[in-house]
Amino acid sequence: MAVLVTGGAGYIGNFMTRRLLDDGEEVVVIDSLERGHIESLDKRITFLKGTLLDRSFLKEAFIQHSISAVIHFAGYISVAESVKKPSAYITNNVIATLNLLDEMINAQVNKIVFASTAAVYGNPTKIPIPEDHPKNPESPYGDSKLMVEKIFHWYEKANGLRHVTLRFFNASGAALDGSMGEDHQPETHIIPNAILAAINKTPFTLYGKDYDTPDGTCIRDYIHVLDLAQAHILALKKISEFPGGYQYNVGTGKGYSNKEVVEMVEKVSGEKMNIVFHERRPGDSDKLIADPSRIFSELSFKPQYSDLETIVSSAWKWHTRDRR
């Protein structure tokens, strides 16, 4: 029996795939390669190129392969892009997931771990943010993930779907030896963009300096990608043992401002950066900091690599790997 990883050629999906393989699991990856990287795929996996919008492709995938559970990463992830292209986000993140769920049910596969986001909360009224905080997404991206979360509830009632939703805070970092890392095109995340600016000695843009935070730049809770992979392993174990649906924040409970991130890049790189401020990006919240107490207590999750220096240092090794 295999674990199906959708979006397995992407950043987090690639780390997840490697972790499953190293744990002795058989892995099938589905990825359209629209934004994934085929060269990053581990040779041990079974790779199927295709889109979740193609029902016949999905149906055949479940017929041909003995799937026991699904870890679902496939989807678009940019807040700013979603504001400009809401239709694309609803189609790719919601309709594609409906197709996946229906083909899972047809194939009698009833376990799924879903990569959601802290963006479902919108601009929070309580910090740190608990899972029962009101959900008021400020972007189509956040709303698309919340729609899927709601859909799971009804599939559980109708079909006995076992599901865990993991609401990521800011996924970040790379393999500790720099052998794997983040490579989005275009790249929208602050840490890789700051590192690339330091490497190329180019100005670095920070969006917004008038947020309601101590230094005026927005604050985020960063979680290392290796810790994220561990959270998915624990989530899969949960629904393998217990029926039902579960939601967990995946963060550390500690936030860093954009300025603090840039300062850490300067420390790790030894480069003084030229910072240029632009207006806020649409849809960005002032602070997003997790209350991770539920996942800590129920799944015994304990981040090991998510201090800011380890995150930035590992990412620096990845982005400078050719130089080394």
Image: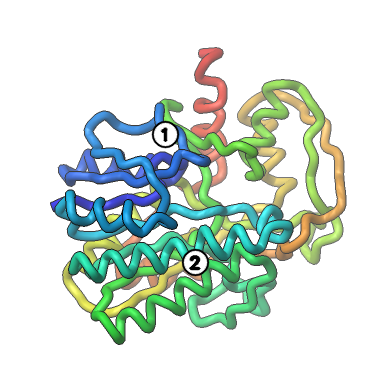
Residue to which mark 2 is pinned: 94
Choose between 154 and 184: the one closer to the eye: 154
Choose between 300 and 103: the one closer to the eye: 103
Q: In the figure, is residue 277 to the left or right of 243?
A: right
Circles 1, 2 touching at the beta carbon (< 8 Å): no
Residue 12 point in image, percent of width and height:
43, 46
Residue to which mark 1 is pinned: 175
Residue 190 point in image, percent of width and height:
66, 43
Instruction: Name the amino acid type tagged 2.
Output: Val
Residue 232 shows in the view: no
The disc, 1 or 2, on the residue closer to the chain's N-terminal end is 2
Q: Is residue 86 above or below residue 9?
A: below
| Residue lying furthest top | 323
Q: In the figure, is residue 46 to the left or right of 56?
A: left
At label 1, counting other C-alpha atoms closer than 10 Å, the crowd grade (few under 14, some 14-19, many 20 or more) is some
Residue 100 point in image, percent of width and height:
35, 63
SS for tag 2?
helix
Instruction: Name the amino acid type tagged 1.
Output: Ala
Q: Is residue 212 above or below residue 18?
A: below
**x 25%, y 51%: residue:** 61
Q: Nearer the viewer, mark 1 or mark 2?
A: 2
The alpha-carbon separation of the residues under discs 1 and 2 comes to: 30 Å
Q: In the figure, is residue 25 to the left or right of 99?
A: left
Residue 78 point in image, percent of width and height:
62, 53
Q: In the figure, is residue 208 to the left or right of 298?
A: right
Q: Is residue 280 above or below residue 270?
A: below
